[in-house]
Amino acid sequence: MMQQVYAFGLLHHEADSHPDGNNNRSSSSCSSCSSNDNNVNVNVNVNVNSIQHTPGLDAEPTLASSRLDPFLSANSIVVLWSSWCDVVLAYTSDGHGHGLRSWQVRYLGTGLSPAQKVHVCDIRISDKLGAGEAGEQGLNVTFFGDAMQHGLRGYVLTNKADDSDEEQEEHQTVVLFATDPELENGVPDVQTYRVAGDWPTIAGIKMLSDDSLLLLLSPKKPPPPPPPPPPPRGNEPAGQSRHMAIAHIPSVPALRAHLSPSASAAALPNFLHTTNTTSTLQSDAPKMSNHVSTNATTTTLVDANMRVWTWSNDARYQRCLGRPYDGESALGQVTFLSETLVTKVVSGGYVSAALSSEGELFVWGQACPGSKGEISVLGGRAEGDGPATTTTTGITVEGEQDEHVKCLVVYIDGVEASVYDVAVGYGHVLVAAEAGAGPADARTVFAAGDNARGQLGVTKKSFQSEFIEVVALRGKRIAQLSAAGWSSFVVTLEE
């Protein structure tokens, strides 16, 4: 088994600029990111900082394109972070055994200074059970930043002094990367903070569009209790609640102050606005990244009962909430999904999407301001609405629709398919689906939205309003979809 990464679209480079006029640093990947492992294949001929379409795909992609060349192959690959200007991948040549695996980190893009790039590529991470519970994909690291402004801003690393000791307490380190203005004001390139012992576990950090941050916190694992007396049946021992807390920090400088040795975790401000919500948002550390998502206007949460809540303080974009705006900035439940068990939420730009435990896909939101169009399903319409035929492959909108949330129906060769992954970039959406337990060709990927930089991997249209099949990915098993800014990354599992 091998995994491979395919890329579509464009990462920012020197000749390019952000729509807001924010040019980042020179484009490169640090030299220490290069692999010398014979089991890891990095296509060094690929200019990964200006990927116009997947290397090997036609110079003018069409629906009939079927050839793909990955730019990285390894036993296991994870996209840990992506933004408009950078991406972080981890890969390993180790097998899928139960022990400690050593991962290498590769940074591509322009968001970091040379010293910061070297630092990222020198991170040593692992996925040993116990050491990695706080991280995405089972790894012991989570990255965070601003997907549409500065890019990567830092990470949280969870470690033990002795990984072989399952009962040893974990310790965490938060690393922050200075932006260009901060560097000019004397802030070091890399700032490292050891998280104090009285802090709960930081399961992740999310950055909002106003530069404030959400800290996703869960209680540390308590030490093993003495054998007698056992806790009363049906009751959770005192101090062992696994309910998640969310702290709202107004800025990165404020986070630095909270992480200082003299600060106390008790001073962290609580983001949750209602007692009822606080009691239902439960920590599920390995899936934490699936349970909290942010975009340009909205924060979306999944509670312990797999229900969806949204929050925004911007009344201009009510469609992005997935529910009527009641004039309050408090969290509110998305009532259309109140009977649906949601396993994952993702957001980007002005769109959010949710996956259910039954493989259903729900979307809500609107076109990005200044966009050349809007994805049709957001308005409750799609070409080809109506009964499926044996040749139907595409995505339509279910008949009766909520005003805000749209339930989508996916067909592959006329058979209704189940969705198992979804990713949302600044203005584009990727969907991975499969139709039952049939042949390999009953799996595929769909894409829609902004395609100005080729981030959909198909068609030369600058905007694709209807979901279109990425034919080059037909039959491939998708391990991960990732989208941000004007780029897309697809990790496949190859037999």
Image (tube, grey):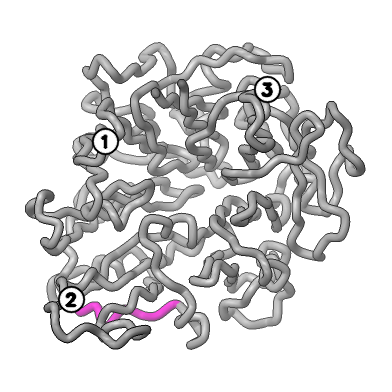
Task: Estimate how packed mark 3 is, as few (under 14), some (14 to 19) or many (20 or more) residues with alpha carbons within 10 Å.
Answer: some
Query: For numbered disc 2, what is the local secondary structure?
Result: loop
Crowding at mark 2 (Cα within 10 Å: few <14, some 14-19, many 20+): few
Give whichever of 97, 42 is nearer the camera.
97
Tell me the distance, in whole angstroms, between the alpha carbons under discs 1 and 2: 34 Å
Q: Earlier in the sequence, mark 3 or mark 2?
A: 2
Over which residues does the magenta segment extend? 263-271
Name which quarter of the figure residue 299 lies in.
bottom right
**Are circles 3 and 2 on residues that touch, CB within 8 Å?**
no
Residue 340, position as x, y percentages in the image: 66, 65
Give the left or right position of residue 413, taking residue 10 as reference: right
SS for callout 1: loop
Q: Horizontal and vertical percent for residue 14?
A: 44, 28
Which circle, 3 or 2, is nearer the viewer? 3
Residue in front for this viewpoint, 87 or 434: 434
Q: Quadrant of the N terminus?
A: top left
Q: Which amino acid does label 3 sit on?
A: Val
Vertical comparison of 114 with 173: above or below:
above
Amino acid found under the numbered disc labelled 2: Asp
Q: Which of marks 1 and 2 is nearer the N terminus?
A: 1
* Label placed on residue 97: 1
Q: Residue 471 carries which label?
A: 3
